C-alpha cells in the first residue's frame, strides 16, 4: 500500500503536484481541499455561518461529497451537483479556511479520508495530512513557496476564471490564510520532523512531482 501525504500553505502547488504524481504512478488522488471547500459552499448557500460550530455541526449530515471521473475530467459532487467550478470562487477560499478550523468538520472529513487511504494506494494533499490525517504515512512531504509566488499563482488562476480582483487583495488573503492555518487550535498546518521540505518557488509542478516520485521510488527500493 502506498500512501503519499503532502502538506503546505495555500498556493504552494500541492493539488497540481498531487494530481501529477497520481497520474504518473497510476494511483488515486484525493482532493481533500475540495472537500472542505464543498462543505463551506454548502454552509454559505444555506445561510450558515462558517464560524458557528454548533450550526455547522447540524448541517454536516446533509452534506454528501463524492468524486467522479479521472484525471483532468475528475469532478467533485456536492449532493449530486457538480460544484467543481463553484468551489474555486474566491469567496469560497476564505469560507473554507474558516470552516476547516471547526473540529466537527475536520473529524467528519478526516474519517472519510482515512477510510479511502486504508483501502487503496493514494496521494493526499492538505494542511494536516502528515500530522493528523495520515500521521503514519510512509512518504510525507511539506511543499511551500514564497508568499509572492503563491499569491501570483492564485491570482493568475482567478483571472483565468474571469474574476475581477487585484493582486494585492489575493496576497493579503494568502497571508491571512497562512495565519489561520498555522495558528488554529485544532490540527494546524505544521512541518512535521519526518516530512521532506520542498520549496517550489523556482520549480515547475513537473519538477516537484518528479522529485517526490524519485524519493518514493528510493524509499520503496530501500525496504
Image: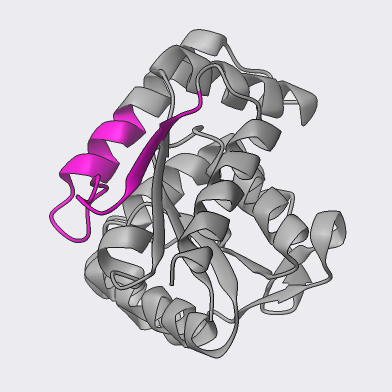
Q: Residue at x 38, y 70 (%)?
A: 137
Location of residue 142 in the rendering, given as x and y in whole percent from the top left corner: 38, 44
Q: Nearer the viewer, residue 93 or 134?
A: 134
Q: Residue at x 57, y 16 (%)?
A: 152
Left/right of residue 115 with respect to residue 155 in the rendered view: left
Bounds of the magenta segment: 176-200
Location of residue 28 in the rendering, given as x and y in whole percent from the top left corner: 67, 71
Relative to 113, say whether 139 is above or below: above
Location of residue 18 in the rendering, given as x and y in whole percent from the top left corner: 61, 52
Q: Quadrant of the C terminus?
A: bottom left
Does residue 4 show up? no
Relative to 102, say whether 116 is above or below: below
Count the marks: how many?
Answer: 0
Q: Nearer the viewer, residue 152 or 58?
A: 152
Does residue 18 show up? yes
Q: Nearer the viewer, residue 212 or 70?
A: 212
Can you name the residue that lies furthest to the left here? 185
**Colouring method of the image:** one colour
Location of residue 32 in the rendering, given as x and y in whole percent from the top left corner: 51, 62
Left/right of residue 119 with respect to residue 73 in the rendered view: left
Q: Residue at x 31, y 33 (%)?
A: 178
Q: Nearer the viewer, residue 164 or 8?
A: 8
Q: Is residue 16 magenta?
A: no
Relative to 113, say whether 129 is above or below: above
Amino acid at each position: 500500500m502506498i500512501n503519499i501525504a503532502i502538506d503546505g500553505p495555500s498556493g504552494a502547488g500541492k493539488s497540481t503536484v498531487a494530481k501529477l504524481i497520481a497520474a504518473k504512478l497510476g494511483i488515486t488522488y484525493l482532493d481533500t481541499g475540495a472537500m472542505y471547500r464543498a462543505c463551506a459552499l454548502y454552509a454559505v448557500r444555506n445561510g450558515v455561518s462558517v464560524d458557528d460550530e454548533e450550526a455547522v455541526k447540524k448541517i454536516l449530515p446533509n452534506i454528501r461529497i463524492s468524486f467522479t471521473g479521472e484525471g483532468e475530467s475528475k469532478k467533485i459532487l456536492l449532493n449530486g451537483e457538480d460544484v467543481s467550478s463553484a468551489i474555486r470562487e474566491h469567496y469560497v477560499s476564505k469560507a473554507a479556511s474558516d470552516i476547516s478550523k471547526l473540529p466537527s468538520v475536520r473529524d467528519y472529513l478526516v474519517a472519510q479520508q482515512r477510510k479511502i487511504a486504508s483501502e487503496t494506494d493514494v496521494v493526499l494533499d492538505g494542511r494536516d495530512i502528515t500530522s493528523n490525517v495520515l500521521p503514519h504515512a510512509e512518504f510525507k512531504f511539506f511543499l511551500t513557496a514564497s508568499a509572492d509566488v503563491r499569491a501570483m499563482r492564485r491570482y493568475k488562476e482567478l483571472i483565468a476564471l474571469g474574476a475581477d480582483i487585484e493582486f494585492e487583495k489575493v496576497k493579503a488573503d494568502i497571508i491571512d490564510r497562512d495565519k489561520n492555518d498555522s495558528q488554529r487550535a485544532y490540527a494546524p498546518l505544521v512541518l512535521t520532523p519526518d516530512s521532506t521540505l520542498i520549496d517550489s518557488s523556482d520549480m515547475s509542478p513537473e519538477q516537484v512531482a518528479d522529485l517526490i516520485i524519485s524519493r518514493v521510488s528510493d524509499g520503496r527500493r530501500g525496504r
